[in-house]
Amino acid sequence: MHQDTPRFTEKKKWFRILCVTLCVLVHLCVETSCQSNSDQLNPAKPKESYTMTAEDVRNERYLSTAHVPVSIALADVERQINAQVTGLIYEDNDLNNNGGDNLMAKVWKRGAILIDARDSLFHFTVPLKIWVKAGVSVLGFTKYTDTEFEIDLRFKTKFDLDPDWSVNTHTTPDGYSWVRRPTVSVVGLNIPITSLVSRMIDKNLDGITKTLDQQVRRNVDLRTPVLQAWNLLREPYLISEAYRTYLQVVPKRVLITPLRFEGRVIRATIGIEGNTLTTTGAKPTVQRAVSLPDLTVVPHVDDNFQIGLLSEVSYSEAARLVSQEFVGQTFKFSNDRYAITLTDIDMFGQNDNLIVKAGLKGTINGTVYLRGRPYYDPKTQTISLKDLKYDLDTRNVLFKSAGWLLQGTFARTLEKQLTIPVGPYLADAQKQIQAQLKNNHVAKGIIVNGRIDQIVPDQVYLTPTGLIAVVNARGRVDVKVDGLL
């Protein structure tokens, strides 16, 4: 057998050392190269895009309509009118006014004013006591004398509300009847002057009715209290301090049916259309309205109501809520061979998909993007995600550098646990609304009672400002008017 020379043996030793060194260097280079490719993830960010705005979601497809049947007892109307009209209601102390009519008069309400309703008209019976002083010519001489008599005047009034919220009445005389006829005493004789007074009353009835209508139109102001109520209704109301949740009503239109007269009850139905929504975060800023929408008279309004509860969560708020649960959690894979920890979470929309941006550190570092379809889960009362998967570019990057993450349970775990709680918002909103519908004295003499019968989930919408979960509350509401304002 050939024996190596000492010099040749030394050369072989150094050659082996060189080969081992080169192998180690190559291995380190390859490992470093692989490490640089797999340790730092930087997939392309999906494009942010939206098909709907928050205003689109609040459009008429999700318009809330509260249909309010109103009943007013004529006894309440009578009581209010009689409380306002008492004692002396007219006085004329000048014989020479009114074109020198040579007449003075005082008029008192003699008894309760009675009201009936027939054929869409109010019928008023006004009992009066009248004192008159007049110049009576006898044998060419004018003698001033006075008399008292009692009469029941009757009027009928058509009552309308104009689109600009003005009260419009049209009153016409409906005759009168004598209770005690007028007479004057001249030279000890009682001389009936019924015909004279009748002519005076007939002459002035049209003027009286016109004056009544003018006074109603001038003095009955519905716009001011309705505008106050309108702005009060629009003011955001804090329903959950812990969740920073506000209930907000955005009224759009007011409907009313013509007055109906059924026995001694006046009935109508009012419909208030608008948007009812809940928002999280800072209190929404609402500018006070300075005008009202036109009042719309419609032939019929259903007596049930629907409220679309819109729970809006901004992307930053949703990310904050989810981060509280996930950021800092560590996920292990392949029998603990690999491990990653979530460092941050962000969210935005791409058409119908919610994009979840997750920051990772550990075996791999960087960012991954996942996409899923949000939906409202009525069982958990949360916004959850269906089919949460890696975005295509993220999937391609992981396929080359971290296939174990593709085969792991990370996406499935996120899908199962990544939920945005909106149930407390909706529950608080429902609770507050139900409280407002229970024997609520909204104003003097006006009592609201109602109930919410059904909560029906709609869907979740992605808008440029956040996620909006829509559920519809259906029920009934009744308003009792105990007297008039």
Image: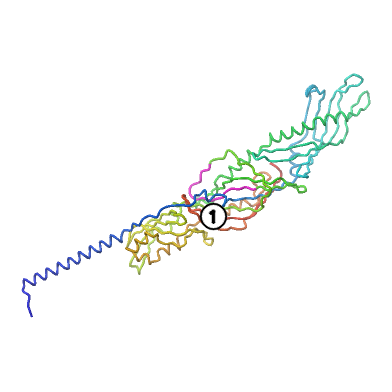
Let me know if residue 278 is in the magenta part: yes
Residue 402, placed above or below residue 161: below
The foreground one among 7 and 95 is: 7
**Residue 128, how many percent across, how many down?**
82, 35
In the figure, is residue 360 to the left or right of 231?
Answer: left
The image shows a total of numbered marks equal to 1
Q: Residue furthest front?
A: 51
Identified at 30% across, 60% down, the residue is 39
Residue 417, placed above or below residue 214: below
Q: Which residues are magenta?
A: 271-286
Q: Give the residue number, with chain letter if any, for mark 1.
A: 470
**Given the image, on which type of amino acid does mark 1 rest?**
Val
Let me know if residue 400 is in the magenta part: no
In the figure, is residue 320 to the left or right of 128?
Answer: left
**Residue 24, how many percent across, how many down?**
20, 66
Q: Name the image quarter holding the C terminus.
A: top right
Badge 1, how many Cα within 10 Å: few under 14, some, many 20+? many
Majority secondary structure of magenta residues: strand
Residue 64, placed above or below residue 181: below
**Residue 234, how many percent across, how many down?**
57, 45
